[in-house]
Amino acid sequence: MILVFIAVGIVPLTIFSLVMINTYEKRAVNDRIMELQTQENMLSNLLATTGYLATVDSPEIEAEISRLADIYNGRIIIINNNLQIIKDTYGLEQGKYLISKDVLQGFNGTTNSYRGKDKNIKITSPVTHNQSNEVVGVIIMSISTKEIESMRTSLQSTIIIFALTLAILIIVFAVYFSRSLTKPLKSVINSIERLSEGYMEEQMSVKGYTEVERISDSFNKMIIRMQKLESSRQEFVSNVSHELKTPITSIKVLADSLLMQEDTPVELYREFLVDITDEIERENKIINDLLSLVKLDKTAGDLNISSTNINELLEQILKRLRPIAKKRNVEMIFESFRPVIADVDEVKISLAISNLIENAIKYNLEDGWVRVSLNADHKYFFIKVSDSGIGIPEEAQDYIFERFYRVDKARSRETGGTGLGLSITKNVIQMHRGAIKVYSKEGEGTTFNVRIPLNYIL
Ligand SMILES: Nc1ncnc2c1ncn2[C@@H]1O[C@H](COP(=O)(O)OP(=O)(O)OP(=O)(O)O)[C@@H](O)[C@H]1O
Ligand SMILES: [Mg+2]
């Protein structure tokens, strides 16, 4: 990411600046050349009019030449038509002959100006006789461009320093920003890793930008859910083991006490064996209930849906339960407001409704009544199971659908309940996308309202 910043930002900027410097330098050199050319022309005119080249005896002109050379910090060489150097402001080559391409071209009337490898500007121009137009000599001016050069280097180093500073700043900012962006994410990752290692008790607290805080919130919600699931799982397991152990403990106590006594009368054997059979039956019921719950959990959504006559189904259930009701002299009333045909899993719905009616009989009073009614609208059918029984205390109503929950443990044991019936019922109804509600008043009776769609919705 940092490299991208630099590539996108600094590199083009630097290249642009360097190109600008080059252009500037070229212009500066060109300006200087033009200026010098003018000066050289003026000198050339002066030399031509004074006839200096022929006489070489004019202190004023010599002074002028030296002044010019001084101003530009350069060297001026003047050559006569014998190709002899008659003036060199450096004084080095005076009297010598100079034959070069520039000089020869000068004698042909051409002015040559360029910047040499030594970065000096060199201008060679002819001195033309005023009347005859004949080239009588050549002036060579060689001027250093050190100032332009040093200007260029100093500009260049300023730009390089600027670019470097910018690069460092960008790197620092990029590192800082990426840190502050990735830091909360890292702690999110840490928390998730802790969770996958099995530490479910830790919540996440990440401060950062909004998105990360939202991730952290959702994570915490998930953790809370998992904690609830885990604790209900633990509770379920401990309930199951407790429930399964109770009948076995009783059986063991009964059997032990028979074994300890000698000459036990046959009647006592009988009595104890009846008790043992009861306990075995109880164990059997718990196991069966558990199995059907597990099956419901496992095959959720895997319903065996068929068009079912609900009126007939209810009649059958009532017929099956009537003998039990009769034992307690509980009156069974069935009212149906219309014939109802619905898409349901017949076996499971039958189990669910049986549980409700069984409860209504079990938790009833002697000579009480149970009323089952069936109704429907265009979307749902409704089953209502009311009884004149003991009722469910208000504070218990929230829990009755939980596995193994029983309001009065002692009484329920007497009636053989395991506390699984209602949770099976609720499970089945929810699988059918239905709903169940309870209305109850302690000592007055209880009503369960069930609502199930007529057509099964996937
Ligand atoms: N019609 C009712 N009247 C009064 N209390 C009820 C009624 N139905 C349920 N309850 C209370 O709710 C508890 C849970 O009912 P549930 O059917 O789940 O279990 P159970 O009847 O005790 O055992 P199981 O149905 O598994 O044999 C019961 O123990 C009872 O205390
Ligand atoms: Mg029950």
Image (tube, helix red, strand yellow):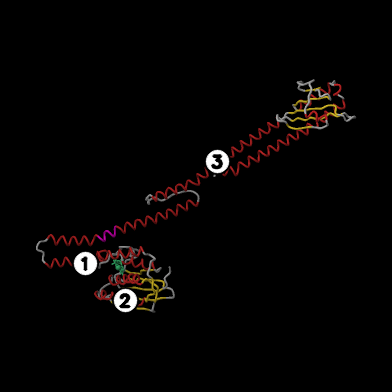
Q: Which residue is under mark 3?
A: 171
Q: Which residue is under mark 1?
A: 278
Image quadrant of ligand 1? bottom left
Given the image, on which type of amino acid does mark 2 rest?
Gln
Q: Is residue 395 visible?
A: no
Residue 359 point in image, percent of width and height: 30, 70
Going from the N terminus, do you reach mark 1 or mark 3 first? Answer: 3
Residue 186 point in image, percent of width and height: 46, 47
**Which residue range is magenta in the image?**
238-244
Going from the N terminus, do you reach mark 2 or mark 3 first? Answer: 3
Residue 151 vertical position relative to residue 349 in the rendered view, above or below: above
Work out how far the residue at label 1 is from the one at label 3, CA to CA, in angstroms.
81 Å
Q: Which residue is under mark 2?
A: 316
Q: Secondary structure at mark 1?
A: helix
Do the CB atoms of the residues marked 2 and 3 lie less than 8 Å apart?
Answer: no
Does the residue tagged 3 have its C-beta within 8 Å of any atom of ligand 1? no
